[in-house]
Image (tube, helix red, strand yellow):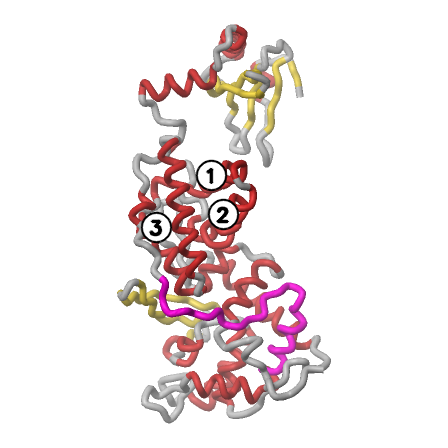
Amino acid sequence: MTVRFTKYKIDNLKAKHIPYKVWDSQGNGLHIRVQPSGTKTWRVKYRMFGKEKAVTLGRYPDITIAEARLQSLKEKLQVKEGIDVSHEKKLEKQKINLPEVEDDLISFKNICINWAEQKSKENKVKGGEALNRFKKYVFPMFKDTPIKRIKTHMLEELCLEIRNEYGFYETARKVRQDFINVYKFAVKREHMENNIARDIDLIKRIKEVESHPAITDKKKTEDFGKVISLLNRNNEDIVLSTAIRLLPHVFARPSELRRMRWNDIDFTNAEWTYQMTKITNGFTQKIDRLVPLSPQVLEMLRKLYTGTKDFEFCFPANTKTGYINKKHLSDSVDRAGVDRSIQSIHGYRASFRTYADEVLGFRPEICRQQLGHKVYDKNGVAYNRTLFLDERVDMMNQWSNWLEELSNKVVENYFVRKQQTIS
């Protein structure tokens, strides 16, 4: 859009959901850029050696229309003399050591994207692979955290989580190298003084961890529904049948579910709170976790309560620990007819992670928080267990409703024991 600039017209330029430009009818490449925040910035477009470039003059109304037009004319005259004005301004800024505008607020996410875009120009495949790793593992954790507020230990924690939680050693190693490259990119552009990613310890290969079998393909939601149906139709001992039915609804680690205590269940507020243990580099860490309980889960627990309310644990057993063990859980799943080579008792976390995001449309950071993974705020501080609580309550309710719908749609069972033939 081109207009004759007046104070009235510029003052009445409204912010939109994306940035847009308005050009000065007097020419010289002068235009004003309106950001979604409402900020209005004067810029001058020019060409140098056949390449289109632009230089920023400053913000409106700090710089008036008359001053912007005069400055744009000066910039154009310099361009005619062969001077690359934007490059000269960068050199001048370096000489007087002025920081970039709002440099402290530049997000880690933006720097990663900029580096990946540059990498793609050199190698499209590797640049694309790096960006995909960022989208899957990095952005959900750091969101819009400014790069200057991220510490080395945060980067290292994510690399170790990729290795330990997902069992992806090679991916963890590549993400570490991505971080080093991103910070090298940031240092060169003076967003950072030092490459803190170089202090991340080398990611060591641990005992090979096989990915737990899980149905995660969007085209196989019907198959996932058949698994849920098998679990729901299991009517053996109420302790074991309730335990395996809860697996897909709360997707806690099986060890955490087996240790569920009645004192940790709040029927009034529909919550299960407990501490989960994570071991990182030999150090044991206790992390508080809160699981909103859907109406379906509450109904299952109320029925179980009538039979086990006199015990400390929700799933009591005649064992040294006082609760069911992993074999109890696995054998019960086998008796229900679920092939654990297709959907393991550990695999419901992966199924949730995929389907809650790609089918139900919940944001990755909400899913990560519910899985007990760390998500950092803009100050570089890990969110507490109540982050996104309202959204997570809604998500858990929708998740249980979706599981119920899938199970109800099942007509026949394709998931049989390994020794039987799938027809």
Residue neighbourhood size for the residue with mark 1, other residues' Cα within 10 Å, grouped as few (<14), some (14–19), many (≥20): many
Label 1 sits on a secondary structure element that is helix
- Residue 310 is inside the magenta segment: no
Percent position (x, y) of residue 11? 56, 21
Three-letter amino acid code at the position of disc 3: Val
Three-letter amino acid code at the position of disc 2: Ala
> Magenta stretch?
205-231
- Write down the residue under mark 3: 381
- Residue 207 is inside the magenta segment: yes
Percent position (x, y) of residue 6? 59, 13
Q: Is residue 10 visible?
A: no
Label 2 sits on a secondary structure element that is helix
Percent position (x, y) of residue 282? 27, 66
**Disc 3 or disc 1, which is closer to the eye?**
1
Q: Residue at x 56, y 62 (%)?
A: 354
Please tell me whether residue 46 is drawn above or below residue 298 in the rendered image. above
Q: Residue at x 56, y 26 (%)?
A: 34
Residue neighbourhood size for the residue with mark 3, other residues' Cα within 10 Å, grouped as few (<14), some (14–19), many (≥20): some
Residue neighbourhood size for the residue with mark 2, other residues' Cα within 10 Å, grouped as few (<14), some (14–19), many (≥20): many
- Write down the residue under mark 2: 130
Q: State which tag comes first along the sequence, 3 or 1.
A: 1
